[in-house]
Amino acid sequence: MNLRSSMNPPEEISVRIAATQQDVSNPEAPAADRRRFDAENLTTLLYPIVFGVLILILWQTQVLHRILGADTFTLPLPGRILTIIADNAPEILMNARATAIVALTGLLFGSMLGYLLGVIAAVFPKWGIGGLTVVSAFNAIPIIAVAPILNNLTKDFSRDADTRSMLAKILVVTLMTMVVMSINAYRGLTELKPYSEDLMKSYAARRTDVFFKLRVPNSVPFLFTALRVSVPGSVICALVSEYFAEYIVGVGRQIRENIVLAQYATAWAYILTACLMGILLYAILLAAEGSLLKGRR
Amino acid sequence: MSVFKRSSRDAMAGGPAVVLDANEPEIKVEHVSVRFDGKKGAAPVVALQDVSLDIRQGEFISLVGPSGCGKTTLLRTIADLQQPSSGRITVRGQTPREIRLQKKYGIVFQNPVLYDWRTVRRNVCMPMELKGVPKKTRTATVTEMLELVGLYHFGKKYPHELSGGMQQRVGIARALAIKPEILLMDEPFSALDEFTKEKLNEDLLKIWNKTNKTILFVTHNISEAVFLSDRVVVLSPHPGRVSAIVDITLPRPRGLAIKNTPEFGALVAKVRNSFEGV
């Protein structure tokens, strides 16, 4: 039975209708679909960029200052901020590196721990759901409350102030990212399509097979849902936890130090650095999601 | 039961051949009742009441009835996805559980239940992975099955790139991939439009003809049941029970044109008139 002969007219019509949206008949090139996707992409990029450029023009021409009633000392001009970044590049990079290490290490440990908690809750649902409720209560604690506490708890960890500060900061990020991941992992492992468990049962699949061939792959989009929250969150947690850390390093800490010293231009340089770090990590995440979830809907 | 004492591994790998007496039914449903306990205080819901049914090997049999008549419950009980409250089901002289563990059932559900992270080929492949079929055999069988359902050229597509009818055909290919003895189909085409449904009905008869499986087909569509089946089992609701079994004496092979014959119309009317208390 070949393809042509097996398809009746109505089915062919339905295929053709589908082909107008996406070229089903040619497996290689869903050209129409890609074109539409590009146009969509273009506008989603274009609008914020136009808006950003507009703000920059208003800012550099000091119209923004007049609107806000600010002066160029507290709100330095974009050109000056960029000059400072260029002049202090090595120092800024060193601080950005420290923040990135905290954010990414915390994100890694937090996400792994969170997934593990999700797995445990999915395997032992009786107390797993209750456990997750307790875990999500951590979500309600503000970072500015957690950071000093963890700072205090880790003060005997090492003789080196940098090391013990690092640990405290990473722990803050770990705690916060763990919560998001655990709840989403649990949902991904348990919210299965109707009949998919019955299907596995009808093939007498082992529990491990159900887990690795159904639950784990099912959880992948949920994993990215968690990361979309926790990637920017990890940067924010890292910045805030640096405020309270013992050892003075990191982009967040530099923002604070420079504001205290009334060096607003330098503070703004670090604020811009923090923004760029968040955007860069989020862009990496979206690219990874795009390539890993290709073919899914 | 005693034939399984060799080892459970043996049973998993396909089990010993059970020689059936030609007169012995392949599936024997004896006085089966299924009750679902309601919430505290509420009376239990009787989904099936004292259902008895014999299904012969290679037979195409349909369960028809309105919603709530227990047709899906009966299929699920035979499939060992639901336990009977009383009564007994024997499949090839064994319990449904034993048959399920030997992976002799192929089930097609109301929706295709394709895994959206797997391509069409890998979806069809999935049951064979669970069964531990060697990779070379798997690849060959996937090709064979996709050719059977007319989707060979769509193997590398993902499920969402296919139409509903094509997705359901992938589901059928997957169910057939482990060469089951019995194909259980639970309203497989109910979500499809009339044209696609009729086409897939014809295709299903061709596949049945080629593979010679026993097919138990659940539907609420009388015309579909009459077109496909050797016998139509009419179930009536509240409580679910067999109210009639209608022999479909239409000649085979059947094409869609048969639906225009007076004999077909008479059989549809006979099935329709068999319902009680609807």
Image (cartoon, grey):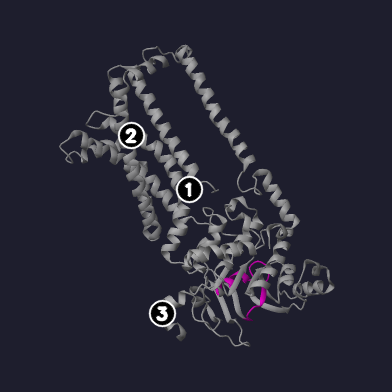
Mark 2 surroundings: few (<14), some (14-19) or many (≥20) residues within 10 A: many
Numbered-mark total = 3
Quadrant of the rendered structure where residue A152 is? top left
Residue range highlighted in magenta: B53-77
| Residue type pointed to by label 3 | Ser
In which chain is the residue bearing label 2?
A: A
Q: Which mark is residue B216?
A: none
In which chain is the residue bearing label 1?
A: A
**Mark 3, residue position:** B7
Residue, x 58% and y 35% (percent of image)? A38
Residue, x 45% and y 57% (percent of image)? A215
Left or right: where B42 falls relative to B232: left
**Mark 1, residue position:** A221
Rounded to the nearest angstrom, the CA distance separating label 3 from label 2 is: 57 Å
Residue A237's x, y, as percent? 34, 35
Residue A11's x, y, as percent? 71, 55
Residue B162's x, y, as percent? 63, 53
Residue B127 appearing in the image? no
Rounded to the nearest angstrom, the CA distance separating label 2 from label 1 is: 25 Å
Q: Inspect the magenta stretch and tell me whether residue B250 lies in it.
A: no
Same subunit under labels 3 and 1? no
**What residue occupies the far left of the structure in this picture?**
A159
**What residue occupies the far right of the structure in this picture?**
B262
Relative depth, front residue between A247 and B12: B12
Same subunit under labels 2 and 1? yes
**Mark 2, residue position:** A100
